[in-house]
Every structure is written in structure tokens, then in C-alpha cells.
Image: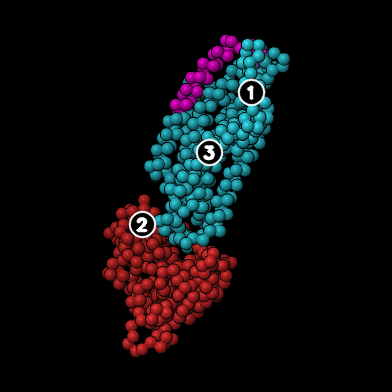
């Protein structure tokens, strides 16, 4: 497609030259480094605790099971802070890149000039989106390499093929997550005439993703299936109901941020605890199984990206440029 | 002389408003064609439809032998546009802005480099070629816009209010440039304006628009004749007659 590379290159150079981009990138890098540092310390401490106090039955029996449990649980839990921070700041960074992609060009009068050239409108929308994607790929790569570097240097985590694949998938899912918010910003920049309005709309979606939808899931779950607090035999317990958990999971999972955290937690979980009677048993989860458990969220996640980008594309290619 | 643009029943409706109403006319190759009319009469909408930026509600046009609805890309392949209030990338200088557009138009690198420098000199921005466009005055931006419209060496040049914001000296230079492009390069030039003096000085033919329709079309003498203008009557009076004001 003629002009695609030109558009993407220009968009990428414009993005990385902007102060707002550098500022948010620096913030993302700092929060990820701090959270992986803390996570690394927590991981190291949990490793030694697990080794000395573990008394669970592993699938293959013996102490190896203790090791698996220790590393498995702690890896996903230790990186949890990094995941949460990435879902917060990563979303903001993607929106900051794309919220004025089209309406800024329209407002300053350069969109008419661009579209008077013998290029398809697809070229503009793809070029601008790809330029943004390259920028977030750069950001994610630097942030991940730095974050994982800090984590590994603190914990001495052995980079086995299994761990490397899981971390690579974590990186890939994080890219898709940012690509979703990039597409949301692009869509609003096409639909709304002013950059300030599209920024506001994008931020409302982001806020809904991290707060409103998960809270709504909790509230609706409580309304439909109230979770009761009871005291029996002098001990307090929650009579949890599967209905509440299901409703909450379904509604919360509609939020890109919750879906992202669910997928990444599934990918990074190398084992889970199961109880047969009173005996807890550690079941190992390989990468394929982890991906299978994350599959519904992953399909929704990729589908959401496709739907949002397709909406942006269709609207832009049919829009009158006045 | 063959036809450069053939407009057939071009119409654009926005809800209740008919911005352009079944407009039909031809523009010949090498002609300087003026589109004259008050604000909101449909001049810019017509131009933007010719470039495929606005999709016609009805009718079509053939530009460079290509249908603007069926093959918009081919239609605008050899067309240069200076839009009204043309915008640029403020973080880039004149050279970088023009090089970007040249790259977009697929102009070979070695040709583009030379052409960009010549165009910058031609529009009088030689001293400011390395200054970021964000620091340009409105007139300077308009000059850069003219250079941009020529960067792909088009056969048809469309200028929407080209003298807007340009000082008298720049306006005179632009008029000379338009004449030169028409005579020496055989370029077809269409421009919209409110300034009747420019129309008088430059145009081979003029279309006067009123409420989305063509109120009159022809050479200046033909337009005068159509409304039975008295000898020596000012062209402003003629224009106002077409608008139904006098």
C-alpha cells in the first residue's frame, strides 16, 4: 500500500518526539522498575519460606513439589504489582499517543491536504495506527527488559524455556492490551471533532476499565447473589456462592484491564493448589494448559481489539472531510 | 483543447441542506477557471467532491479521465490542492514538510530533493526554509501551501482561497505564478475566491455559484452579457445581479 511506510514512519517519529510521550514513558518505566524490585524481594522471601515450611504433596511427590509450588505461586504473585501498574500506566500511555491522531490533523487543516494525495484512506488510518504500535512496542520492550532484568537480578530466577515462554506471552498480551487503548483513542479521534473531547472520552473508557466495570461486576453480583457473612462454631466464614463469583467474573472480564490481568495471571501461574479431603495437592500447569485456561479471555481480548479498530477504520473511510 | 474535468449533476445534501445542487460543467485543459460566490454557496464542497474528500449524494465527475466516485485515487493522481486554511506539521520545517508530501506522492528521492528546494525559493521562503513551520506567519504558511500543492507536479491545480492572508506583494506574485503555470506548463487551474479583482485579472472562465447552484458560467464578457450589464458597469455589480442582490 503506497504511502503506508511514510505515514507510519512520520507518526512514529512525531510520537517519540513529544514531551507527553517521554513523560508517561518515564513514569511507566519507574513504576514498573519499582514494582518488579518489590516483587523480586517478595519472591525471594517466599522462596525461602516455602522451601523451609512446605509440607504439601507434589504431583511427582517429595520436595520437588514444594519447589514447584514456591516458584509457581510467587512468580505470578510477585509480578502482580507490575501487571497492575502496567494496566494502569500502559493504558494511559496508549491513549496519550492516539487520542488526537485524526482530529488534530482535521483541526489544523492538514487532513484535507493529506487526503488530496493519491493514497487510500486506509493508508492514513493504518499508517497512523502502525506508527503508534511501533511506539508502544518500543516502550513495552524497554520496560519489560528493564523490569524482568531487575526481577531476575534480585531473585536469581533461572530463565528456563518454560519461564521465558511465559514471560514472552506476558509481553505479547501487554502489547495487545496497549493496542486496545491505542485503538480506543484512535476511534474517538475519528468520531469526535476536538482533541480535548476525545481525550476526555478515552479517559472515561480507561477509568471504566480499571474501576467502574470491575466495581459494577461486584455490585451486580451482590444484588443477584448476595454473599452472606455468617458465624459458625465461633469462626466467621463467607458463604460464597458460585453465582456471585460467575456474575462478577463475567462482568469484570468485560473490562480490558481485568481481562488483561486475568490472562497474564493465568499465563504466569505454573501450578495450582487442589484439595482432596483435607490434603492440599499441588498440580503443575504447563504453558499449553495455562493458555487454555486463559483462552476465553484471550479471544475476547483480541476480538475487542479487532472490533474497535474495525469501527475506527469503517467510520474514517466513510467520513466526509470538510 | 480537451476536457480536464467533466462535472455531471454533482449534488451534496446534508440533512435538510443541499450544499451543491445538480451542478454540471466542463473545465478545459490549460484553462484558468474561477469559482466565485459568497460564503456557504458550495464552492469548497464542489472542490472537495472532485478530490473524493466528500462523497457526492448524487452525480459524479470525471477528473483526469477517472470517475471521482468509482476511482477516486486515479482521479486525484495528478491533482494538487491548496485547501482553505491549509495546515502543516508545526514541528517540521518547510523542507521537511514538503519532503514528507513528496514521499507520500511517490516522487523519487533525487527528483523530490531538487524540486522541494526550487519550490521553496519560488514561493519566497528561501530564507526560512529551515525554520519550523510553527513559527511561520499566516502569509508564509499560505506560500508554503502553494509550494505543497505543486510538489507532485500536478496537471490540475485546485486553489481554495489562495490569496487569503497573503500581503499585496505576495498576492501579485501568486497571480504571476498562476499565469506562468497555465501558460508555460499548460496546467489547468481552478481557484475559488471572494476577490472579484483576481477573477477579472486571471480567469479564462468563471462560474458564479449561488445557494449550491451555478447562477452563471462563461468568460467575463459572456457573464456580463447574460445579465445585460451596461457598458462600463463594474463587475461587482454584475456579480451582485447574479446573486439577486441588485
User: Residue A43 magenta-drawn?
Assistant: yes
Relative to residue A17, is residue B48 depicted above or below? below
Tell me residue B38's x, y (percent): 40, 72
Q: Earlier in the sequence, mark 3 or mark 1?
A: 3
Circle 3 or circle 1, nearest the eye: 1
Does the magenta-highlighted stretch encompass residue B178? no
Residue denoted by label 3: A208
Chain ID for label 1? A
Dot 3: chain letter: A
Percent of width and height locating residue B14:
52, 65
Residue bounds of the magenta highlight: A33-58
Q: Position of residue A314 (x, y in %)?
A: 57, 54
Q: Mark 3 Cα within 10 Å, few/some/many (few <14, many 20+)?
A: some
Q: Which chain is assigned cyan? A: A
The local secondary structure at tag 3 comes to helix
Q: Residue at x 32, y 87 (%)?
A: B232
* Residue found 33% across the figure and 53% down from its top: B134
Check disc 2 and report the residue beneath it.
B95
- Judge the density around disc 2: few (<14), some (14-19), many (≥20) Cα neighbours within 10 Å: many
Residue underneath mark 1: A228
Between the residue at mark 3 and the residue at mark 1, the CA separation in whole angstroms equals 27 Å
Amino acid at each position: 500500500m503506497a504511502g503506508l511506510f511514510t505515514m507510519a514512519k512520520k507518526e512514529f517519529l512525531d510520537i517519540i518526539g513529544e514531551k507527553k510521550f517521554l513523560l508517561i514513558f518515564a513514569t511507566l518505566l519507574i513504576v514498573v522498575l519499582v514494582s518488579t524490585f518489590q516483587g523480586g524481594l517478595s519472591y525471594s522471601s517466599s522462596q525461602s519460606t516455602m522451601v523451609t515450611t512446605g509440607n504439601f504433596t507434589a504431583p511427582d511427590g517429595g520436595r520437588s513439589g514444594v519447589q514447584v509450588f514456591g516458584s509457581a505461586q510467587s512468580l505470578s504473585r510477585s509480578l502482580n504489582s507490575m501487571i497492575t501498574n502496567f494496566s494502569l500506566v500502559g493504558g494511559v500511555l496508549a491513549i496519550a499517543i492516539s487520542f488526537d491522531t485524526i482530529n488534530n490533523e482535521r483541526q489544523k487543516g492538514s487532513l484535507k491536504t493529506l487526503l488530496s494525495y493519491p493514497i487510500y484512506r486506509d493508508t492514513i488510518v493504518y499508517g497512523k495506527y502502525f506508527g503508534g504500535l511501533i511506539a508502544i512496542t518500543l516502550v513495552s520492550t524497554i520496560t519489560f527488559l528493564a523490569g524482568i532484568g531487575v526481577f531476575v537480578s534480585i531473585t536469581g530466577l533461572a530463565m528456563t524455556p518454560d519461564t521465558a515462554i511465559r514471560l514472552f506471552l506476558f509481553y505479547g498480551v501487554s502489547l495487545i492490551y496497549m493496542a486496545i487503548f491505542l485503538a480506543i483513542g484512535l476511534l474517538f479521534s475519528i468520531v469526535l471533532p476536538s482533541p480535548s473531547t476525545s481525550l476526555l472520552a478515552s479517559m472515561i473508557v480507561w477509568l471504566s476499565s480499571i474501576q467502574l466495570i470491575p466495581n459494577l461486576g461486584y455490585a451486580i453480583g451482590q444484588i443477584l447473589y448476595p454473599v452472606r457473612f455468617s458465624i459458625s462454631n465461633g469462626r466467621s466464614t463467607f458463604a460464597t456462592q458460585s453465582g456471585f463469583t460467575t456474575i462478577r467474573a463475567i462482568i469484570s472480564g468485560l473490562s480490558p484491564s481485568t481481562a488483561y490481568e486475568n490472562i497474564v495471571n493465568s499465563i504466569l501461574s505454573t501450578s495450582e493448589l487442589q484439595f482432596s479431603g483435607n490434603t492440599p495437592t499441588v498440580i503443575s500447569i504447563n504453558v499449553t494448559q495455562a493458555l487454555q485456561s486463559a483462552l476465553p479471555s484471550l479471544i475476547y481480548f483480541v476480538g475487542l481489539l479487532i472490533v474497535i479498530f474495525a469501527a475506527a477504520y469503517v467510520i474514517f473511510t466513510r467520513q466526509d472531510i470538510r | 483543447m480537451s476536457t480536464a474535468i467533466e462535472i455531471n449533476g454533482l449534488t451534496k445534501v446534508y440533512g435538510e441542506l443541499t450544499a451543491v445542487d445538480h451542478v454540471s460543467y466542463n473545465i478545459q485543459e490549460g484553462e484558468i477557471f474561477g469559482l466565485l460566490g459568497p460564503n456557504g454557496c458550495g464552492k469548497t464542497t464542489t472542490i472537495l467532491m472532485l478530490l473524493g474528500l466528500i462523497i457526492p449524494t448524487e452525480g459524479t465527475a470525471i477528473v483526469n479521465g477517472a470517475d471521482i466516485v468509482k476511482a477516486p485515487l486515479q482521479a486525484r493522481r495528478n491533482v494538487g490542492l491548496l485547501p482553505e486554511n491549509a495546515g502543516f506539521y508545526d514541528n517540521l520545517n518547510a523542507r521537511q514538510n514538503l519532503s514528507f508530501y513528496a514521499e507520500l506522492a511517490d516522487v523519487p528521492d533525487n527528483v523530490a530533493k531538487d524540486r522541494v528546494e526550487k519550490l521553496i525559493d519560488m514561493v519566497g521562503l528561501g530564507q526560512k526554509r529551515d525554520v519550523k513551520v510553527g513559527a511561520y506567519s499566516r502569509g508564509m504558511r499560505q506560500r508554503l501551501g502553494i509550494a505543497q500543492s505543486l510538489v507532485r507536479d500536478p496537471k490540475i491545480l485546485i486553489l481554495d482561497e489562495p490569496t487569503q492572508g497573503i500581503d499585496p506583494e505576495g498576492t501579485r506574485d501568486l497571480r504571476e505564478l498562476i499565469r506562468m503555470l497555465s501558460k508555460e506548463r499548460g496546467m489547468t487551474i481552478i481557484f475559488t475566491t471572494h476577490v472579484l479583482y483576481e477573477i477579472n485579472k486571471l480567469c479564462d472562465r468563471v462560474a458564479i455559484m449561488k445557494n449550491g447552484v451555478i447562477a452563471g458560467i462563461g468568460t467575463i464578457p459572456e457573464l456580463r452579457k447574460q445579465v445585460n450589464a451596461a457598458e462600463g458597469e463594474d463587475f461587482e455589480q454584475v456579480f451582485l445581479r447574479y446573486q439577486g442582490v441588485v
